[in-house]
Amino acid sequence: MDALFSDEQRLFQRTVRAYLEKECAPSQIRAAGGAWSWERWKGLADLGVVGLTAPEANGGLGKDETDLVLILEEAGRAALPEPLAETAGVVVPALIDVGFPEMSAEWLDAIAAGEGIATIDRRERMTLESRNGDKTAMAMAGASIAGVDIATSDRAAFATAAVLSGIADRVIDMAATYAKERQQFGKAIGSFQAVKHLLADALLGLEFARPAVYRAAWSLAKRSFDVQRDVSMAKALASDAAFNACRSALQVHGAIGYTHEHDLHLWLTKGFALCNQWGTAAWHRERVAAVLSDRSPNRTLRVSFRRSE
Amino acid sequence: MLQTTTKRSIPSSGLSLRFLTTRQISSRPVDFAFTPEQDAFRAEARAWLDANVPREPLPSFDTREGFESHRAWERTMADARWSVINWPSEYGGRDADLMRWLIFEEEYWASGAPGRVNQNGIFLLGPVLLEYGTAEQKQRFLPSIARSDEIWCQGWSEPNSGSDLASLASRGVRNGDDWVLTGQKTWCSRGAFAEWMFGIFRTEPGSERHRGLTYILIPLDAPGVTVRPITQLDGAAGFAEVFLDEVRVPVANTLGEPGQGWTIAMSTTGFERGVVLRSPGRFMATARRLVELYRSRGPDVPASLRDAVTRAWIDADAYRLHTFMDVSRFLAGGEMGAETSLNKIFWSEMDLRMHRTALELLGGEPDPRWLDGFYFSLAGPIYAGTNEIQRNIVAERVLGLPRS
């Protein structure tokens, strides 16, 4: 048990944060009308971000979800318009798991180089698109490897949970900063207990969702028997945490937060949308409930960290 | 991941580095699997507990009979060196690191073992004795705590100093080699039967707030001490008030330096709120019992209660994961800071929700264990610093909001 990210993992996270602060500022997102930027995507690829989970043979870094999770949080913190979660968190692992070797190799090369990008729709149909306009679609429900089912929808739920955690982190920061600056009744509104407790609760939700998101990353990477339960727990907690954080951040900002003029909406609209995508909190809790109701011997409640054999 | 953040370490540019600034050093990627050594330790603890935990529940430790039977259980544990495993072996421990302690706690509560009657001595006083005590004090007190030969209560709150603890007025006056203590302490859990009390007293006349306080160890059989049990809302005498009327205590019973009392007391509370007072094992055990109760009620449980049970289990597991991350960071050289207040809010409110859900599943059916647990869980958001105070601490010291 060493539930701590390595200095290398944290350093990579810091590098990505610095890049996004420079290349994905709210003004830049607004100027492009929220559209994808191939230049930024290429820049992320040069850092190793886009091909993080792609094999080294294809120009990627060959890393797993425990490396990806911190980077997806940064994507959420930056309200990144490009589909990094879908590309690096869902489609690349799916291509590796069950892809048709020749087609996969070609697309993995393109993605790792920042020349390819991937999305997935609600019906789990994946679309691969290249910078020069090539497009291909495929469907892949998941793979069973070493006896453990990894559903595409579970990868998507995990990646979404990680992005939500980053969104929650950012809007809490924004609200805390605003509460320190905004004066009413002659003092900063952050000195009022009602405001303090609202933000303390938002942080509470995030802080206890985060370890579950990290554990889900680990369970995916290790193909744990409990991967479905762990992913569902992560998405349930992250959805609720992000909803509360977004809602509280808006409340602290007041009317200005409700405007398009203020940057807050870049995160709020994403957060409110993503918390119900790839399974609502209630849907995922119901999936955990099914595990808790299951008395079969493979379902032990006693030890909850198990790798596949 | 939660990192150490204090008021000082928050970058002036804002909060964006909240989760990145840290003194931790780790060269390994994150790993949630236990090592073979940790698994072996777990198996050893489980085997001992399976063989030794009393089959019948002991009477409540808030009765004289129950207090003594719990003391006997502590001695059974001490004989096998299980009572204070994270202490140095010279004082009865096993030099176990916090990760092993968490594993032991999981097994302890999963086994249905009795509550820890000397938890104030073992978990609150022990660590500060190890840090601030003299060699003589350690030798004098630690082994007797490990065996529960002496059971401790905490003397902090006063009738007019609860959330505002720093306003406390009980005083100590130096007289030769003695402190002469006068005042009133209250809400002392297990104070009715305890042998000793650790407390903080105002020893500098005219001092205010956190200054001029001293941490003093007091035998409750000293002349001038009057202990009055307080009957709680559930009918048990779980805590007591302690009156001190010119009680003479040797200056050698001072922990740390005179005037250092607040610092020492807060080093206890940080850790208390953080990890040691309420390990995740306790709540995982409650969550599992709740799941068992839910399963036993058949298929007609309303969906909303099924969801409440699921939330309880998820929250308990989230608390567990969070603690493993905290402890991993701590073992890598990080510190526990104000974010421990988050833990206290989380576990106390989770515990209350779990017990409420159990009573709803029971639907009025009498079940003394769940009912006692429910009443105890009601106290959680109050003791060890109310959750309102904790939310202020989180807002001010973690989020950097201005003081009121």
Image (spheres, grey):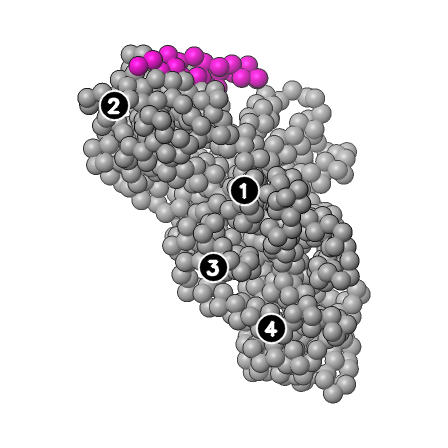
Find residue A125 and report its image quarter: bottom right
Q: Are marks 1 and 2 on the same chain?
A: yes
Image mark 3: chain: B
- For marks 3 and 1, the one nearer the N-term is 3
Mark 3 and mark 4: Cα distance apart in space = 20 Å
Badge 3, how many Cα within 10 Å: few under 14, some, many 20+? some
Give the residue at mark 4: A22
Dot 1 falls on a residue whose secondary structure is: loop
SS for dot 4 = helix
User: Does residue B302 appear in the picture of this structure?
Assistant: yes
Q: Nearer the viewer, mark 4 or mark 1?
A: 1
* Bounds of the magenta segment: B226-246
Q: Which residue is mark 2?
A: B174
Q: Is label 2 on the same chain as label 4?
A: no
| Residue furthest out toward the bottom | A132
Q: Label 4 amino acid?
A: Lys
Indicate whether A19 appears above or below A179.
below
Mark 3 and mark 2 lie on one chain; the one further toward the N terminus is 3
Instruction: Please give the residue where the numbered disc 3 appears in the rendered image.
Output: B21
Q: Residue at x 45, y 47 (%)?
A: B337
Q: Nearer the viewer, residue B232 or B208?
A: B208
Chain of the residue under label 1: B
**How far apart are the two marked residues, 4 and 1, measured between alpha carbons?**
33 Å
Amino acid under disc 2: Arg
Residue lying at 45% horizontally and 17% vertically, measured from the top left: B240
Label 4: how many residues lie within 10 Å, few (<14), some (14-19) or many (20+)? few
Q: CA distance from mark 2 to mark 4?
A: 63 Å
Of circles 3 and 4, the one toward us is 4
Residue at the image position 65 percent from the left and 20 percent from the top: B366
Please name the residue that numbered disc 1 is placed on: B403
